[in-house]
Amino acid sequence: MNAPAAEKVFSDYLDAFEERDFERLRSYLSDTRFSYHSPVSSYASADTFVANIARVGPILERIERRMIFVEGNTVCGILNLKTTMEGLRLVPVVQLATVVDGKITELEAIFDATAYNRMFEPD
């Protein structure tokens, strides 16, 4: 059986995230070779990553897919995350995903974390 194409795995991952189906989202991530990096966090475990992004679920309204580029097993998504939070209503994000054997092994999110970091600054 052939592994699904990288773009389909990434698209299905985004669908699960937008639908807040974190169990299904987890199924698209590698069990043994997963890493995630962003300006605000890094994870070496898919389970830890999912547990933490599940906290975003209640504030996520939708994910707008502006452009998706694919080169081999690497997918680049230019996205807008729409949230319910006043200071983060629209968060432009570039997400890079590496897909191996039908599973995402690496995710990197690139975005301006200034507004996010302000939420955690002492008054």
Image (spheres, rainbow, N blue to C red):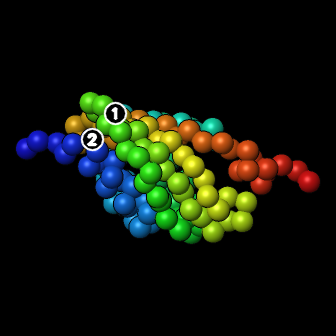
The residue shown at (49%, 65%) is: 62
Measured Cα–Cα span from mark 1 to mark 2: 7 Å
| Mark toward the start of the polypeptide (1 vs 2) | 2
Q: Residue 17's spot in the image, x, y percent?
A: 43, 59
Which quarter of the rendered picture does the N terminus lie within? top left
Answer above or below: position of 78 versus 52: above
Task: Identify the residue position indicated by label 2 in the image.
Answer: 6
Residue type at the position of mark 1: Thr
Looking at the rendered image, the quarter that the C terminus falls into is: bottom right
At horizontal 63% and vertical 38% (from top left) the residue drawn is 39
The quadrant in which residue 100 appears is top left
**Residue carrying label 1:** 74
Residue 104 image point, x, y percent: 34, 41
What amino acid type is highlighted by mark number 2? Ala
Which mark, residue 34? none
In which quarter of the view is residue 2 placed?
Answer: top left
Numbered disc 1: secondary structure: strand
Other-residue count near label 1 (Cα within 10 Å), few / some / many at <14 / 14–19 / ≥20: some
Name, please, the residue furthest toward the front.
66
Residue 30 at x, y = what percent?
33, 41
Is 88 on the left or on the right of 26, as rendered? right
Q: Determine contact: label 1, label 2, CB under 8 Å.
A: yes
